[in-house]
Image: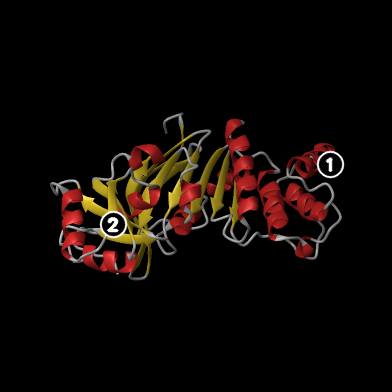
Amino acid sequence: MNAELAIRARGLSKDFGSLRAVDRLDLDVPRASIYGFLGPNGSGKSTTIRMLCGLLTPSEGSASVLGVDVPGDSGNLKPRIGYMTQKFSLFGDMTVFENLQFIAEIYSIPASRRAARIDEVLEHYDLVEQRGQFAGTMSGGQKQRLALGCAVIHKPELLLLDEPTSAVDPQSRRDFWANLFRLAQAGTTILVSTHYMDEAERCHRLAILDHGAKVADGAPGDLQRSTGMNIIEVLADDPYHAQTAISTMPAVASVTQLGIRLRVLIPETIPDALDQVQAVLADHGISADTRLSGASLEDVFVAVTLGPEERAE
C-alpha cells in the first residue's frame, strides 16, 4: 500500500442476501487527515466502516488498512484503531474513571502508565469533574466526550467514527470537531460518517455515498466547484407558487425551498438557464429576484444523487 495512504480499498462490496449494501467501492484515505462519508441512512456508510475494521467480511473486493489486509489480518489491526459509534458504547452503571480503566485494560496499556493516561484523557476531554460520575447519568455531550476518550485512550493510528454526533446538541458537535482537528494535527487518521452537510464541509476530503455506491469523491471545495449544474437562487414573494412554476421546466433537476428562497439546479449544458427561469416566473405572473449562485455542499449532494429526469416534489 502507498505509505501515504491509511486506507486503500478496491471494488469493496457487501451483500446481505439479495441486497447490495456496498457496491464496488474504491477508496483512498490519506494519513493524518479527516475523511468523511456523507450519505443518508442506508447508503452504506456503516457497513463500509465495519468492513474496514474487520467486523464484516466483504462479499467482493479488497481493502488494506494501515498496511494490513482486512479481514484476513484484522486481529493485528484492532490494537491500532479506535472505533466509536453513534450509540456511545459505554457502561452506564460504571463511573467515568471505571469506563476508561476498563478500556485501558482491554487495550493492554501497561499498569505503570495506565493511571497517567486516564488522567490525561480526563483532562483533555474536560471530564475531570465527572471522574466519579456514573456514565448513565451524564448529558449527551459528556457521554460523547467520554466515548471519544475511550476510543483514543490507546492512541490509535486510525479513528473510525460512525455518525458520532447524531445524538448531541450543536455546541457539543462543534467541540467534538475541535477535538478531531487536534487529533488529525497530531497525526491520527480519521474516517467519519455523517449526514450533516456542515460537518461534511469540515472534512479534508469527502466521499458521497448513495445506495451503496460512491457517487463523488474529493475536497469539499473542489466538489462545490464541479457540480455540473447552474445554481440559481430565487427570492420570491410567493415561494410555493414559484416552486410550482419552476418545477414545470423540463430542464430542472431540482428545486428546493430554503425559507423564503429557492435553490434551482439546472445542468450546465442548458443554455441561458437563468433567463429561462425568469421567463417561466414572468409567464406565471410571479414577482421574484433571481441570480446565479455558487454551489453549497447540499447542492453537490443533490446534483450527484438525482438523475436529470427527477423533479422536486
Residue 288 in picture, x, y percent from top left = 28, 57
Of mark 1 and mark 2, the one earlier in the sequence is 1
The residue wearing badge 1 is: 115
Q: Residue furthest right?
A: 132
Q: Residue furthest top?
A: 3
Residue 115 in picture, x, y percent from top left = 84, 41
Is residue 36 shown above or below 133?
above
State the quadrant of the N terminus: top left
| Three-letter code for the amino acid on which mark 1 is drawn | Ala
Q: Secondary structure at mark 2?
A: strand
Report if residue 114 is visible in the image.
yes
Q: How many marks?
A: 2
Q: Quadrant of residue 257?
A: bottom left
Q: Residue at x 38, y 50 (%)?
A: 208
Q: Which mark is residue 257?
A: none
Q: Quadrant of residue 22?
A: bottom left
Q: Secondary structure at mark 1?
A: helix
Q: Which mark is residue 288?
A: 2
Residue 168 in picture, x, y percent from top left = 63, 58
Report if residue 7 is visible in the image.
no
Residue 188 in picture, x, y percent from top left = 58, 36
Q: How is the image coloured?
A: secondary structure
